[in-house]
Amino acid sequence: MHDDAIITQMDQWIRRVVVGLNLCPFARKPLENNLIRIAVSQADDVPALLGDLHAELERLAQCPATEVETTVIAIPHMLSDFADYNDFLDLAEALVERFGWEGEFQIASFHPHYQFEGTEPEDAENYTNRSPWPALHLLREDRLEQAIASHPDPEQIPERNIAAMNELGQPALEALLESCR
């Protein structure tokens, strides 16, 4: 699949699922202001993916938030197994720490088979973090802190999302995710 098709799928997912279902109330403004970069990693091994992650973090570090507020890296050629993806997250976090980006950037995780601890694979609440491709979402911590400070009740976002997912139900959520592919 070509990068353009993957970018389109990820964009549709952000629009229809993340913003459309209001899973992240902080995503609408960067989306509307065209401040979300969607990158596609061509990596097919861990060292190459770490290199792509490093390059995207460097790009964010050197680019003002008024041009790119956040980056989503789609990973189409590896980490299709959720356990492997989870293992990679430890390496990704270690890279952030190694280059001194703790407190500046954080990584949010999304995967087609995302499963929260203590849930079953088919549980609707897992869809809060399901995406068309394995993905790493690179967030600027200062922007996230500003958004959280301006939200009336940020602590309730996860509970509200779980309730909304359960109300929609797994079949509808799977169909919605599939419509982004």
Image (spheres, rainbow, N blue to C red):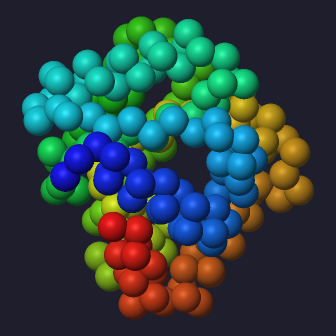
Q: Residue at x 58, y 39 (%)?
A: 36
In this orientation, which residue lies closer to the viewer: 172 or 152?
Answer: 172
**Residue 110 place in picture, x, y as percent:** 40, 53
- In the rendered image, which quarter contains the C terminus? bottom left
In this orientation, which residue lies closer to the viewer: 8 or 176?
Answer: 8
Instruction: Judge left or right: residue 48 versus residue 11.
Output: left
**Residue 167 place in picture, x, y as percent:** 59, 90
Above or below 22: residue 51 = above
Instruction: Judge left or right: residue 89 versus residue 43.
Output: right
**Residue 35 place in picture, x, y as percent:** 64, 36
Above or below 176: residue 80 = above
Q: Quadrant of residue 19?
A: bottom right
Res. 108 visible in picture: yes
Q: Residue at x 65, y 40 (%)?
A: 34
In this orientation, which residue lies closer to the viewer: 65 or 8?
Answer: 8
Q: Which residue is drawn at 42% across and 9% down?
A: 99
Q: Which residue is drawn at 35% across and 18% down?
A: 54
